[in-house]
Amino acid sequence: MVSKLKQAMENGKFVITSEIGPPKGTDLEKMYHHIDLLKDKVDALNVTDHQSSVMRFPSIGGCLAIQELGGEPVLQLTCRDRNRIALQAELLLAYSKGIKNVLCLTGDAVPVGDHSQAKGIFDLDSVQLLHGVRQLEEGIDFGGNKLEGAVQFCAGATVTPEAEPIEPQLIKFEKKVAAGAEFFQTQAIYDLERFAKFMEFARQFPVKILAGIVLLSSAKMAQFMNDHVPGIFVPQELIDEMAAAPKGKALKKGIEIAGRTIAALKKESLCDGVHIMAINREEVVPEILAVAGL
Amino acid sequence: MKSLTKQKPFDEVIQLSDQLNRVFLIGCGTCATMTKTGGINEVQAMKKSLQDEGKLVTGWVVLPMACDEMTAELLNENKKAVQDAQCIIVMACALGVQRINLYLPLPVIPALDTLFIGMEKSPGHFFEACAQCGQCILGETAGICPLTACHKGLLNGPCGGTDKGKCEVDPEKDCAFTLIYERLKEQGRLDLMRKYHPPKNYQVIPRPRESRLL
């Protein structure tokens, strides 16, 4: 069975992915609710892997829940917490359970999270992990040993189109493509003109690009991201627009901005789809899609 | 190159030397003197603090270089005071502590925490330059070590946490790959940044590492 996400991308569909943040603990009710709400509205659902280095229920657990409910999971796999032995084992388990998509990430730094004294592993980086996935597909492990039963994944990676300076980021993008990335989910983008410039570069490569859409929930949050989140640029007009929203209507405005950004990306065929990150507000993703006309 | 140290909280030194009330005190004339963590002044201050806690300081010495093998002879010169003590409190880096531990049967107690082996950038500003990985890649990274200078020790380029040349863990910290990029660009050697670095061999010499010249 081939990945449904891959099929959708190959069929030239404007692909929609979103993400599920697993809970901190074993109460899975809310996570199942979000999966249920989104699984039929998107082509695939990522499950974050201890996002921002905060310990949570594991990505693979969330992916299995998505499978259970009949959705298409994307396993986010970071190099922060596992050495090359554990990373391979995770891939073997995922494949054996029918998970067909993996997003290969370096992972956030340990000190930004809630276990700031933990040891950061980073035995591999994201480029090496992508290479490794392709090697496992050949039936050979990272140590050069033969596998009894190989894997097959639709493998993706991330890129930050607003990074500054941009050239080192683009060089790494090319290395990820060479290592076997088939698709990219980008860091949040808000300025379509600037994103179009990045796409001019990215279009040289045979990969699918899903633009990152992060829901703005208030003018304060937008300003905070500008000031503190690496590689995110929210134009002043959008911050002003959020600030001008009537009291209690900021989230609605954020939904409108996300929806119209997606509609514009699709209309102008700027990219191959979007990856919607509604951090902690998964339940509004259907509204965003409705505004986008999807 | 210096071994960078900081003093342990005094309470920890007292707790580590619990029941050991006769103390011989050792400082180091090299790195710990330069970092003002184990020179003459600090040793004398420690002596006073220990005495205030009711400990008997049988003697003290600031060795020229605690990690050097000359330490054996200098300890011998202080034999009497050393033998009178129940423990040795060492205000040197962990190399000094372990060198002294080779020569004396007494409990050896570190009064300093060893931070890293560093190089001086500007007066009083030290940075870790080498992780002693056993497989030097400086020839491909414009003489800047990403294994050490990148918080995550990445090899194939910057992560998504870099912003305007700084690192996500500390806005004062330079992003190693921005530095490498800028320097390679100046040198007209940016192609080196495109080179794929395979997973690193972390067992060039398995720990604990040893090297025998003879």
Image (cartoon, helix red, strand yellow):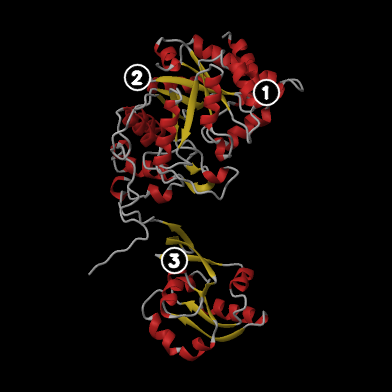
Are the residues at dot 2 and dot 3 in contact (C-beta closer than 8 Å)?
Answer: no
Residue B66 visible in this rendered orientation of the protein: no
Say few, some or many: other residues with alpha carbon within 10 Å of mark 1 (under 14 / 14 to 19 / 20 or more).
Answer: many
Classify the position of the N terminus of chain A by image quarter.
Answer: top left
Identify residue for label 2: A206
| Viewer-closest of B27 and A191 | B27
B61 shown above or below A234: below
The chain containing the residue under callout 1 comes to A
| Amino acid type, mark 3 | Ser
Residue A112 in the image, given as x and y percentages of width and height: 57, 43
Instruction: Classify residue A206 by image quadrant.
Output: top left
First reached walking from the N terminus: tag 1 or tag 2: 2
Asked if labels 2 and 3 share a chain, the reply is no
Identify residue for label 3: B3
Residue at x-position 40% and y-position 16%: A2
Alpha-carbon distance for marks 1 and 2? 37 Å
Identify residue for label 1: A242
Nearer the observer: mark 3 or 1; the answer is 3
Residue A111 in the image, given as x and y percentages of width and height: 55, 46
